[in-house]
Image (spheres, rainbow, N blue to C red):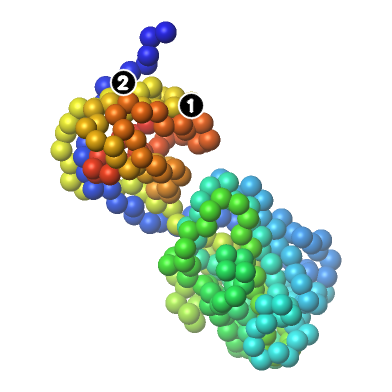
Amino acid sequence: MKKNYLLITLFIFQISFINAQIKLVHWFGTNTSTETYPRSGSALSSELTTAAENYNGLNTYADNRNVWNNPSTDATVDPNTSPYLSYELTTNSDVEFDRFVIGGAAAVGGSVQLQLRWSVDSYASSLGDFTPLNSGYQLFSIDLSSASSVSTGTVEFRVYFYNASGNIFNPGYYSYSSPDGTPASYGDTAQAVSIWAKESILGLDSFNKINVELYPNPTSERIKISGLKNTENYNIYNILGLKVKEGNISNKQEINIQNLKRGLYFIQLESGSIIKFMKE
């Protein structure tokens, strides 16, 4: 059978990833006393297969403004005993999180505080605190952009309630001002809770031309690269700039890509060369 060779004019360049944001999932406000839990999220992005909200140790409340009652007066968070809301996500690719957003919250009848933790470190440390005020609804978020990327699988965020007993109202009806500097763009969708990730856009800086062969292209199983003078390490990135595979390769050695999803990919070699290919 004749091989499907493709001669590529390759550009050697420095690759950069310009970070934008995408919303992974959101939850609208609801009457917690009549809602069924776990509650699925809305408008899941392509990075997620499931997303569910649940609660533990909190009391529901008969009000349409998404109200939770904290019965605990513990002054600090104990991840084993403190009441919490749970947001469990199942991802189908590696994810770099951007922000966890509470669209509008107010504390009524107490000085309840909220603290975000996640399963990545078994809830051992705080990702940040929300401090709702009694004076009205405000937009809050925790910046996760410097946190580690999370591998494909399940990750759970927990919003722990502590410091005082009382109610947290979280309707998310409107866009509210933010005491913690959350950009308004995260709160203009009128949702009670939303979780965001980074979206990376490939950017090209400088380049020179050389000729190489990557084949077959497109392909569904394996690729080879000819013209390599030495064995080189490689990384494969998807169109969002997330690394999906790595290894080393010598001239005309096969790389198995059967486990990659269909779409456009970039293979970056140790020498700095980057080659685009399509997985069928």
Q: Quadrant of residue 273?
A: top left
Quadrant occupied by the N terminus: top left
Q: What secondary structure is marked by label 1?
A: loop
| Picture layout, residue 256 above or below residue 273 | above
Residue at point 47%, 70% (across, down): 143
Mark 2 — residue?
6
Q: Nearer the viewer, mark 1 or mark 2?
A: 1
Q: Residue furthest top?
A: 1
Q: Position of residue 141 (x, y in %)?
A: 53, 72
Mark 1 — residue?
221
Q: Quadrant of residue 254?
A: top left
| Picture layout, residue 215 above or below residue 72 | above
User: How busy is the neighbourhood of tag 2: few (under 14 within 10 Å), some, or many (20 plus)?
Assistant: few
Q: Position of residue 103 (x, y in %)?
A: 58, 70
Q: Position of residue 238 (x, y in %)?
A: 43, 42
Q: Is residue 224 visible?
A: yes
Residue at point 40%, 56% (across, down): 20
